[in-house]
């Protein structure tokens, strides 16, 4: 018997509820993927800025730095630590797209969010396929940025919103197959999928970002961080823009950097909300589609061995469920 089709609003509020009930765990899980990227970029640009600003004094004190090759080596060595931190945090952020889908399945089965490492392995065990999936999605995104493809790109973006859920829950599906499967699931549900996306974008990208900005302003963090970034902005060639009658000051740039920092923090830490909602939406649509899939499989079994990609639903690992019954503090 098919389950009742859930409304977009029910999916949206159920996703927020799951996130709110486990917010401390999700904030902990997303801490390094989000803050690690910020720390890495701060180290890359901060240490490079410090070195270039003090190069003359260092060259006088250490004559070896007068060599161009030595100077270049120091710059590279200065950048590497921050780059490694950023790269690891960025990879963990990408992994979280698939892992949170698995966490949602675990919560629906056990009522707990637990064992982050096991859920990460749902993705890392298929690293190559996951990287190819992200690569294809990145190529699609870049093509969509070309003005002539804006409209068609936006349309297909909606149809491809469930590719990471397909990757997480369905075995035997290739990266290209994830796009095809997502398109088939959303076909006929485009308007409702768009509505859910709009709710998530407005809620996390606008309302929560505005709320954190108010907190930053009240604590005077915006002004403080702007002053921290302002010395670096003076090194930017902003005067070039004056020939186009565009006036941008270092203070304006530093203030915008803080705004983007707030935006990135909110978007990063609220990723679980969006992943949870899309997982719930996937389950809602895949339930509707399951009868058709079964019929197609029965028909294909009567034909020749030639077939398309095989779709098998991946159930949650029993070991993960067993661990859920242990104390939360153990994980």
Image (spheres, rainbow, N blue to C red):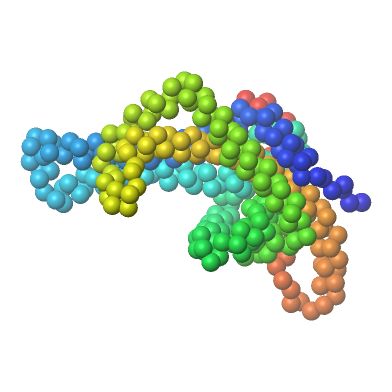
Q: How many marks?
A: 0
Whole-percent x, y for residue 146 in the image: 50, 63
Q: Residue at x 9, y 34 (%)?
A: 61
Q: Does 302 sit left or right of 88 as displayed?
A: right
Question: Looking at the rendering, which quadrant does residue 256 occupy?
Answer: top left
Nearest to the observer: residue 33 or residue 124: 33
Point out the image quarter for the C terminus.
Answer: top right
Whole-percent x, y for residue 216 in the image: 48, 26
Residue 73 visible in image: yes
Question: Looking at the rendering, which quadrant does residue 191 occupy?
Answer: bottom right
Q: Is residue 210 above or below residue 65?
A: above
Q: Does 84 sit left or right of 15 as displayed?
A: left
Whole-percent x, y for residue 17 in the image: 72, 32
* Residue farthest along the bottom direction in this orientation: 304
Q: Residue at x 49, y 47 (%)?
A: 91
* Residue farthest along the top direction in this orientation: 219
Whole-percent x, y for residue 282 in the image: 73, 51
Nearest to the observer: residue 59 or residue 253: 253
Q: Residue at x 78, y 53 (%)?
A: 285
Residue 317 visible in image: no
Question: Looking at the rendering, which quadrant does residue 22 occupy?
Answer: top right
Q: Residue at x 52, y 24 (%)?
A: 215
Q: Does 107 sit left or right of 95 as displayed?
A: right
Q: Does 291 sit left or right of 264 as displayed?
A: right
* Residue farthest along the front direction in this orientation: 245
């Amino acid at each position: 018997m098919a389950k009742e089709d859930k409304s977009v609003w029910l999916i949206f509020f159920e996703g927020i509820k799951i996130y709110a009930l486990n917010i401390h765990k999700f904030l902990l899980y997303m801490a390094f993927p989000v803050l690690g990227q910020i720390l890495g970029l701060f180290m890359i640009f901060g240490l490079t800025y410090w070195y270039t600003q003090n190069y003359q004094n260092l060259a006088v004190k250490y004559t070896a730095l007068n060599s161009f090759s030595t100077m270049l080596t120091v710059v590279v060595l200065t950048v590497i630590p921050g780059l490694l931190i950023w790269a690891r945090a960025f990879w963990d952020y990408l992994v979280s797209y698939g892992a949170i889908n698995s966490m949602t399945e675990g919560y629906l089965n056990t009522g707990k969010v637990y064992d982050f490492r096991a859920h990460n392995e749902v993705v890392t065990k298929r690293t190559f396929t996951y990287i190819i999936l992200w690569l294809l999605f990145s190529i699609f995104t870049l093509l969509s940025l070309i003005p002539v493809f804006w409209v068609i790109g936006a349309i297909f973006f909606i149809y491809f919103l469930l590719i990471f859920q397909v990757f997480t829950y369905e075995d035997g599906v290739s990266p290209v197959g994830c796009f095809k499967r997502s398109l088939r699931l959303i076909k006929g549900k485009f308007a409702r999928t768009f509505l859910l996306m709009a709710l998530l974008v407005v809620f996390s990208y606008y309302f929560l970002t505005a709320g954190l900005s108010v907190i930053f302003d009240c604590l005077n963090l915006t002004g403080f961080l702007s002053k921290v970034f302002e010395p670096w902005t003076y090194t930017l060639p902003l005067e070039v823009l004056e020939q186009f009658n565009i006036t941008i000051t270092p203070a304006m740039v530093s203030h915008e950097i803080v705004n983007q920092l707030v935006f990135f923090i909110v978007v990063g830490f609220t990723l679980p909300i969006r992943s949870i909602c899309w997982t719930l939406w996937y389950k809602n649509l895949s339930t509707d589609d399951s009868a058709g899939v079964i019929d197609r499989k029965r028909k294909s079994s009567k034909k020749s061995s030639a077939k398309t990609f095989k779709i098998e639903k991946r159930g949650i690992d029993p070991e993960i469920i067993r661990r859920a019954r242990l104390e939360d503090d153990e994980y």
